Image: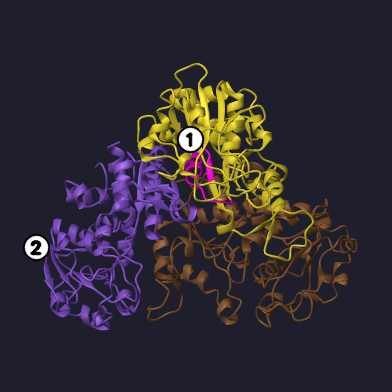
Chain colours: A purple, B brown, C yellow
Amino acid sequence: MQHFLSVHDTDNLSSLVAEARQLKSAGVPKIGQDKTLGLIFFNPSLRTRLSTQVAAQKLGMSVVVMNVDKDGWKLETAEGVVMDGDTAEHIKDAAAVMGQYCDVLGVRAFPTLKNRAEDYSDRILHSFVRYAGRPIVSLESAIRHPLQSLADLITIEEHKTVARPKVVLTWAPHPRALPQAVPNSFVEWMKEADVDLVVTHPQGYELSEDFTKGVTIEHDQNRAFAGADFIYAKNWSSYQDYGQILSRDPSWTVTAEKMALTNQAKFMHCLPVRRNVIVTDAVLDSPQSLILPEAENRTWSATVVLKRLLESL
Amino acid sequence: MQHFLSVHDTDNLSSLVAEARQLKSAGVPKIGQDKTLGLIFFNPSLRTRLSTQVAAQKLGMSVVVMNVDKDGWKLETAEGVVMDGDTAEHIKDAAAVMGQYCDVLGVRAFPTLKNRAEDYSDRILHSFVRYAGRPIVSLESAIRHPLQSLADLITIEEHKTVARPKVVLTWAPHPRALPQAVPNSFVEWMKEADVDLVVTHPQGYELSEDFTKGVTIEHDQNRAFAGADFIYAKNWSSYQDYGQILSRDPSWTVTAEKMALTNQAKFMHCLPVRRNVIVTDAVLDSPQSLILPEAENRTWSATVVLKRLLESL
Amino acid sequence: MQHFLSVHDTDNLSSLVAEARQLKSAGVPKIGQDKTLGLIFFNPSLRTRLSTQVAAQKLGMSVVVMNVDKDGWKLETAEGVVMDGDTAEHIKDAAAVMGQYCDVLGVRAFPTLKNRAEDYSDRILHSFVRYAGRPIVSLESAIRHPLQSLADLITIEEHKTVARPKVVLTWAPHPRALPQAVPNSFVEWMKEADVDLVVTHPQGYELSEDFTKGVTIEHDQNRAFAGADFIYAKNWSSYQDYGQILSRDPSWTVTAEKMALTNQAKFMHCLPVRRNVIVTDAVLDSPQSLILPEAENRTWSATVVLKRLLESL
């Protein structure tokens, strides 16, 4: 594995999941000793920040953390610009320098939700790939969150009760405009996995066809839930009417009543979750909820990915 | 030791102090290797941040640090609420997740000084105890600062010249409203220790009876100082007129003249200290001042506590 | 080496550079195990933050990082003051405490650019030297940046093609008022090294004579560039008209045309660099640019300095 940016960076999904589960049960070899992981945050992070540090330390790596805007300064991403404004350093220089100090770099960079073409170019992430000269791990980019999706897949593998479960990704309401990174990535990974994927959301919340091409879309949430083995809830803002909130319809909140329509489905969410907005307390605090095992698997998705990158150094 | 939240988490105070002093003189065993300490700060910290990290590293532990509001987002603490406001994650979920990533968690969460019942419920700390599933160390909560009090007690043991010293906790002026955590905790620990405790403060600054029941209160500072072996100065805001500053009376500042009333007492303060407001330079910079040995003992209180928690894992 | 504050803390510059290069090629001994480096930032940092952490970890040291204003509170630097304002702790107390927790301390503290006498007293740095009781490494003070200068000298040694190269420090325009620390330090180091130093800048940008006494100053940039082997560009604000921007003249920007006046000179800058303001993309992205090797050498200047300080403990 050269980088970890999307599902396309792994050639064999089931072997990656199997290795993650094996590391989880059998322990982690300290193959990262004398290697440094740099974690670069352009945006806030809790689970990713902690789970990736813990994963690196399990592998014996040293970790350095950089909160770019708070600990450093604003980076320029445009090419050829006269930098007489508020950006103090070009990302190509910052990325190249950080690549010299670290053996592997993780980068978190959210979208603006203002300019779709700009966001979907995933420029910050790709600048690191291009200029850092090191393996890059996406810690959630403008359009994907692959460490989350891999943790989701590990969780589904651990908890499925049928060979090919029905997995439903459902939009749910939220007071703020959120990125499409988690649902994009989830769709991308589930398409490659041995599951039946259905995506349900209100009209206008269609994700980019680059991700959903060939996927079953169902605008009736109740019909989508019928027979489901896993319900994966997430809010996102509109892709077409880019970055806008088109609905806050509380009838899309996941409730115990809706969970009763499923095949005793497990409930999943990547966290942080707005309780009683995305999903009710009754569902989150029920035995059907997998939010904690799913969060714990963030450590194991990070561990297996870092291990693969270290092996390719 | 299951948690370290107050003096009540230790069954034998003198053996805890003795072990801290023994670790200090004889070295620290690396019993924390392959264990992770998570330090979670809801508020600023200098001594606690550094001394706890150093203590953990002496024990061989890895440390991850999370500044909740700055590196992450606002946490909800109320139960059953519809989270459509400015809190992005419920503390029960955040605590449970952080508990999965770390073997021991330290938590710092100050009071609001606005709602006494709310503050004295110590809700953030107890949410971690309830939901994290891991040993919790208080790094100063809304109402207690036990790592400080243990360091204070170690310092008194090291510097006392009589078997049962007279220890005076004196209120002193300060321009801002401060929590009662340090004095509450100090009283709680000194009551269990082999000392004669006297608390002196202006009228209206009575601490909660939950802490001071049975303790000698003396409103005349000079009379309190007479014959004292240790003067422990600290400002706090009013408990009765909750969170208010009732006095900035400079006659309560600790001066060389007042120290002359004592039995050549040592001077203590937990730091940070406002020089020439709480206490004059002349006292702080005199040989009687123990502020530096006291701060150094923060490492040793953290070391012995983490060691005890690791031994109980 | 007792401290690392300026070139005067090293008795033999060429042996220091030689050892840095030797560590770079032959590997770093883990002589810092069970030692802690505290990094104290009063100001933002990217290269210094990461390269110093990486250097310490190569030596086997543990690192704790403190962003003073963000993670802690404001420190008082004046002596004898009544601290009833916005500073919560005196630097003498904070420095002494941090010195107790760490074996070596690194300190970054920029100038205000408002009060020259105050800035040039370098009070924060010297307070740490005076009160911490530990070796202090300057991570860039109000008036010097010696880790940068040492990295610059290592880079010049690695890339020079004549025994005694001509090295030109040139002022270049910038939209904001910047400190004189980097040029002051560069001049101080180059004067001790085996190079011919020329400094060029517009009228009014003379550096303090404490640094430039005896150095060739040339106000015609083109004439200065003639025959140069190294061009070192940097902006600084005026020393005489203290902290002011006297010129934004774009004719001082380093361009390919100006580089053509040199003896195929290498281009250097300490980064972050404002592209197309300080220097054009054409120069920065040419094979003549040494900005990346120079930044990489920050790790090696920090490594050799920390090693020397550890050896003196």
The answer to whether mark 1 and mark 2 are in CB contact below 8 A is no
* C220 displayed left or right of A11: right
Q: Nearer the viewer, residue A88 or C61?
A: A88
- Amino acid type indicated by mark 1: Thr
* A265 displayed left or right of A26: left
Q: Residue at x 29, y 65 (%)?
A: A179
Q: Residue furthest top?
A: C163
Residue hosting label 2? A214
Tell me where the magenta segment starts and ends, as one range. C42-63
Q: Which mark is residue C123?
A: none
* C103 displayed left or right of B35: right
Q: Is residue C41 above or below residue C259?
A: below
Q: Residue at x 42, y 61 (%)?
A: B98
The answer for how far apart the CA atoms under marks 1 and 2 are is 50 Å
Q: Residues within 10 Å of mark 2 (few under 14, many from 20)?
A: few
What element does badge 1 sit on? helix
Q: Position of residue B195 (x, y in %)?
A: 77, 64
Residue hosting label 1? C299
Q: Judge whether residue C61 is colored magenta.
A: yes
Q: Residue furthest left?
A: A214
